[in-house]
Amino acid sequence: MAIRQVMLMGCFALILAFTGCGSEPDGNHNPPGSEASAKTDSPKTRVDFQVEPVDQLPEDVRKHFDRLTASPQGGHAAIPHGSRIFLIISAGQRPTGGYQVKITEILKKGETVHIYAEETAPAKDSMVTQAITHPAAVVSIPQKDEANYEFHLKKATPPSKDP
């Protein structure tokens, strides 16, 4: 019995030695998204943006905004206008008022501009408009080079109706 245990331990040690204990061949032991692994990724640069009042949008941008906010599914768009790109993100149809969409950060990584937005839901016991709403946000950034736009919306969890 003891010889069998020694042989099993030896086999286990050999397996660990040959697999390298799960390490990557390049010696990178950092999980994706960690600070150290981010150093090896292409650099991300923060893009300054300006929140745009909906009632002051240029006509062609306003048409895109109206189309997106009329859609039950919501959506997003990047519309060039003059020296700026207008970025619109809509969460879609919501059952009451109190929902909001806020663009929190815009980062450029390589040729792609990442737009990060977050939806917030009304508090559980808050007084809200009892009407269907379509929360959305519009910002603009300087139009510099051609880029791809990738939108990331973190949707809110609706408030529970349980006491």
Image (spheres, rainbow, N blue to C red):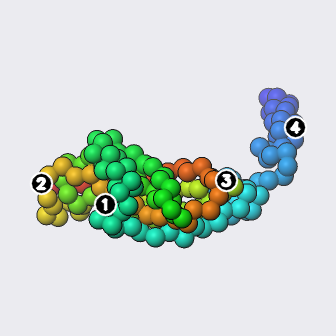
Task: Locate residue 57 relative to residue 78 in the image: left or right.
Answer: left
- CA separation in Å, label 2 and label 1: 15 Å
Circle 3 SS class: loop
The correct choice, above or below, for 80 with respect to 55 in the image is: above
> Which of the image's four quarters has the C terminus?
bottom left
| Amino acid at circle 2 | Gln
The residue drawn where x is 20% and y is 57% is: 97
Residue to which mark 2 is pinned = 130
Task: Locate residue 40 relative to residue 61 in the image: left or right.
Answer: right
The residue drawn where x is 66% and y is 62% is: 44
Q: Is there CB contact under 8 Å for labels 4 and 2? A: no
Residue to which mark 3 is pinned = 111
Report the front residue among 161 and 146. 146
The correct choice, above or below, for 55 with respect to 90 in the image is: below
- CA separation in Å, label 1 and label 3: 29 Å
* Rendered image: mark on residue 61: none
Across and down, in percent, residue 60 comes to: 39, 53
| Amino acid at circle 3 | Glu
- CA separation in Å, label 4 and label 2: 64 Å
| Amino acid at circle 1 | Gln
Near mark 1 (Cα within 10 A), the count class, few <14, some 14-19 or many ≥20, is some
| Amino acid at circle 4 | Phe
Near mark 4 (Cα within 10 A), the count class, few <14, some 14-19 or many ≥20, is few
- CA separation in Å, label 2 and label 3: 43 Å
Residue to which mark 4 is pinned = 18
Residue to which mark 1 is pinned = 100
> Which of the image's four quarters has the N terminus?
top right
- CA separation in Å, label 4 and label 3: 40 Å
Circle 4 SS class: helix
Between disc 4 and disc 3, the foreground one is 3
Circle 1 SS class: strand
